[in-house]
Image: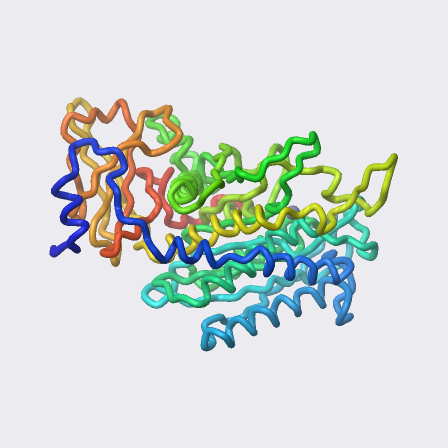
Amino acid sequence: MRLPLFLAALVLAAPAAAQSPAIPDHELLHRLAADVSPEAEHATIARLVGFGTRHTLSDVASDTRGIGAARRWVADRFAALSKDCGGCLAVETPSETFTGSRIPKPAQVMDVLAVQRGTADPDRVVVISAHLDSRVSDVMNATSDAPGANDDGSGTAAVMEAARVLSRHRFPATIVYAVLSGEEQGLYGGHVLADYAAAHNWRVEADLNNDIVGNTEGTSGLRDNTHVRVFSEGTRTTETPAEAEKRRYNGGEVDSPSRNLARYMDRLADRYLTNLDVVMVYRTDRFSRGGDQVEMLKAGYPAVRVTEAVENYRRQHQDLRIENGVRYGDVIEGVDFPYLAQVTRLNVVTLAALASAPAPPSGVDIEGAVSSDTTVKWKPSPGAAAYRVWWRGTTDPQWRFSRLVTSLTQEVLKDVNIDDYFFGVSSVSADGSESPVVFPGPAGTFEREPPTRP
Ligand SMILES: [Zn+2]
């Protein structure tokens, strides 16, 4: 097929094991990053804190206090942004009624979503999410002031700022801005989102779940405003026993689609952001703790958790108080807005890159046992003008070698021994937008598989 000039030049010039052959920077991604405003995010969090508490079981009738007022304000903000972009956002409020150990009486948990429909492949969806609900020391206390400025006012501000910046542009895939509820009571809003995605047959390529993303002063006194942690599961939550057996033998324990999404974010940060580096953490979430991305993973959707580099436990899940001269509580003074803007830029750049690129390839497979060469195969991805075959040593954290190819279905890597590397493929559009790398087989596919758990 006819190649855009820069792709043709790259393919001709690509040596056998080129290290990350350069695709030109996307000017749009730089511009989007520059559009993110810490002042806008400050205004959002100040408004959220003003609702007193946003506890899931708080008052829903009041116009000034509680979760009901807060979510109506979010919906109004999305509607106002939509007005500015010619109706480009559809505001949806899916809800379900739950009871549980932290919801003693049946309670409605309602999410607020803004859906920016893709121009080419609207069922392909990338999501940014955060939780609106807040809490104090007692998770059942629905009346005391619970400002939740950082947990998770910061994530909510990131979602709304991403909507403000990205809704001025059009993308081939759909972007969903998701403000969830019920997280502190048991990840219910994540569950509602996953159910909504399944009911609408969304092909969710990524959920970037932002929970606690605005603090830079750790409890220990350590300050860090140049790193952000991206947590990702190593193997798919929905993997079957048969898939696990094959994966244990041939590898893939560190190559779930969520993990390769984390690697994608790490590369984008290196390329498009200044003074913010991604620290990949090879865990689903922080040790023995949870977030809404877990419900998306259970439903078979790739998802990561984005969290500040250092947490301050005096400002999380605390009654507002001063004890022995130490101030406790999740107040707005604990949010570092230039840092929150940096984390938001990472999200904005990632969403735009994903939504601009073709879908990641499906049907990725490798062969080459008892041979000096490795053959990498895949199925064509709609909208792809080229593919990039990647490989790395089996202990390398990040993809290391790559070759841009114009073949639509396979590439033979001469004298690259299959035993010694992990392999993957990304799809590349005519303008150079690249998808995340897909590891072969069920371990690495971005396609949803039916959940194996209830
Ligand atoms: Zn949280």
- Rendered residue at 56%/61% (across/down): 160
Residue 195's spot in the image, x, y percent?
A: 53, 58
- Rendered residue at 78%/59% (across/down): 52
Asked if residue 164 is positioned above or below residue 397 in the image, the reply reads below
Asked if residue 85 is positioned above or below residue 58 in the image, the reply reads below
421 or 222, which is in the foreground? Answer: 222
332 or 403, which is in the foreground? Answer: 332
Asked if residue 449 is positioned above or below residue 313 in the image, the reply reads below
Residue 195 visible at all: no
**In the rendered image, which quarter is residue 10 located in?**
top left
Residue 179's spot in the image, x, y percent?
A: 59, 59
> How was the colour assigned to the protein in this rendering?
rainbow
206 or 366, which is in the foreground? Answer: 206
Residue 196's spot in the image, x, y percent?
A: 52, 61
In the rendered structure, the answer to whether residue 11 lies left or right of residue 172 reads: left
In the rendered structure, the answer to whether residue 342 lies left or right of residue 135 reads: left
Q: How many marks?
A: 0
- Rendered residue at 74%/56% (across/down): 55
- Rendered residue at 70%/33% (across/down): 219
Residue 183 visible at all: yes
**In the rendered image, which quarter is residue 107 located in?**
bottom right
428 or 107, which is in the foreground? Answer: 428
Residue 229's spot in the image, x, y percent?
A: 53, 38
- Quadrant for the N terminus in the image: bottom left
The extreme right residue here reads: 324
